[in-house]
Image (cartoon, helix red, strand yellow):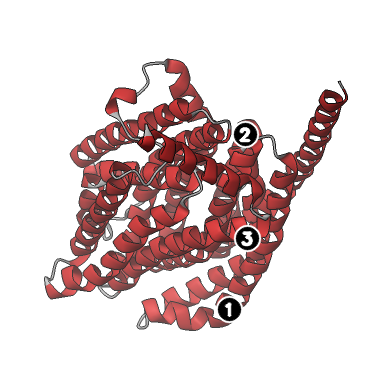
Amino acid sequence: MEELTKEEEKRRAHYRKMTQTPIPKLVSGLAVPTIISMLTSSLYNMADTFFVSQLGTSAAGAVGIVFSLMAIIQAIGFTLGMGAGTLVSLHLGAKEQEEATCAASTGFFSAIALGGLLALSGTLLIDPLMRALGATETILPYARAYGQYILLAAPIMCSSFVMNNIFRQEGKAAMGMLGITTGGLLNIALDPVFIFALKLGTAGAAIATALSQTVSFCILLSLFLTGKSNVRLRITRVSRRVKLYGEILWRGFPSLCRQGLASISSVCLNVNAALYGDAAVAAMSIVGRIMFFMFSAMLGLGQGFQPVAGFNYGAKKYKRVGEATRFTLFTGAAVMFLFAAAMYALAPRILSAFRRDDAQVIAIGVYALRAQCLIMPLFGVTTTTNMALQCTGHSGGATFLALCRQGIFFLPLIWVLPVYFGLRGVQLAQPLADLCSLLAGLPFLVFFLRKLARLESETKGGAADSAFS
């Protein structure tokens, strides 16, 4: 009974923290761990690219090919993680503990099952898969060696994404950071050992990633098993109700669109870049990793914002949701502007660090990187709007916005622009898609903020009527 009392007091303290802490302090406190974990995660992706690039231009191109595969794995993990995590946040905000545990358990074990299915089918069809992802005949051997070990780690990676998202959505981002950061730093340390010391080449980079992801998984799972989360992962609590799976998929659908389209757009980019040789594939692959590193700062800030918005929306604290949205918008725009200015100025040096002896890779990459830097400050608006809609249950609008950047706008542009502008079209497709996405997202942002104001007014009116009666 005493243990139950302590558990209940912990939940009440967490509720007070999420609904009473000043918004700037709360969002910043939750965002710092997620920014660190996201930057670390993208940093080890960059480390893979850097070390593999030293093996040659075709090897560097293989990183871009396997990046499409990793986007598929992330699509599964983030879909289930965001879907289950959003339900966890809303249920905890409404003080529905059992429902939160059921959602978390269902998402976690579903990720293991789907990750295992991907690993089995992908391993059996490794060569056709790598070709479908855009590998040329010269890139294929490197992509095969890299991809086979990433596939083996798919169940672990998918379920780790789910656990990390659950921690974030319940407002305990530091717990998720512990597992992700440890794995990321270990990956960076193991890369040169497996690639060069053990002479395993691109396979060594993949083995280092798989081992590091396993360590992250073990850390995250141990945190759940030792009660660091407000929910439990129990196979006995996996739901048999089709409705819950539908809710998880629907709430996570924007993430599926975002990550799934990241894979599709990466394939289309690889296919179109391959027309201009392995140097173009390598350059666009390197730029993609650099951009993801910068974008991860905004994603980390947004992921710190989401549990605040979702929890307070569930608790009917609509004014706090609006405050959190505006704070994240302005902070994100400022952060992205600083990143963009630095990367624009340092673009030649950064590309030279990856492929110093290939002037063509450097020239292609510098132009593409600088073009994307010009649009980067806009990421703060589009990302915040998308995440605000998703974590408050506006899945239709969030899904549409998720489709915009790398689907509705990017896919037509990456096929049409190269026809008229050649390689320049490949380099300009993403920044133009980002600009179009901003214009599409602004009406949704205005609608969301106005709805919050209306709900807040209705809530106050209801409270006043209740007090009067």
* First of labels 1, 2 by sequence position: 2
Residue behind mark 3: 25
* First of labels 3, 2 by sequence position: 3
Whether pointer 3 and pointer 1 mark residues with C-beta atoms closer than 8 Å, the reply is no
Q: Quadrant of the N terminus?
A: top left
| x then y, percent, for residue 337 | 65, 70
Frontmost residue, 124 versus 57: 124
Query: In terms of image quadrants, where is residue 400?
Result: top right
Q: Real-space Cα distance between discs 3 and 2?
A: 20 Å
Amino acid tagged 3:
Lys
Residue behind mark 2: 314
Q: Is residue 457 left or right of residue 313?
A: right
Res 51 seen here: yes
Residue at position x 21%, y 45% in the image: 152
* First of labels 3, 1 by sequence position: 3
Residue at position x 66%, y 59% in the image: 24
Frontmost residue, 221 versus 397: 221
Task: Note whether 369 is above or below 463 in the view shown.
Answer: below
Disc number at residue 5? none
Q: Residue furthest front?
A: 2
Amino acid tagged 1:
Ala
Task: Note whether 126 is above or below 50 in the view shown.
Answer: above
Frontmost residue, 320 versus 164: 320
Q: Callout 2: 10 Å neighbours few (<14), some, many (20+)?
A: many
Mark 3 or 1: in front is: 3
Q: Quadrant of the C terminus?
A: top right
| x then y, percent, for residue 33 | 47, 60
Residue behind mark 1: 342
Whether pointer 1 and pointer 2 mark residues with C-beta atoms closer than 8 Å, the reply is no
Residue at position x 51%, y 28% in the image: 96
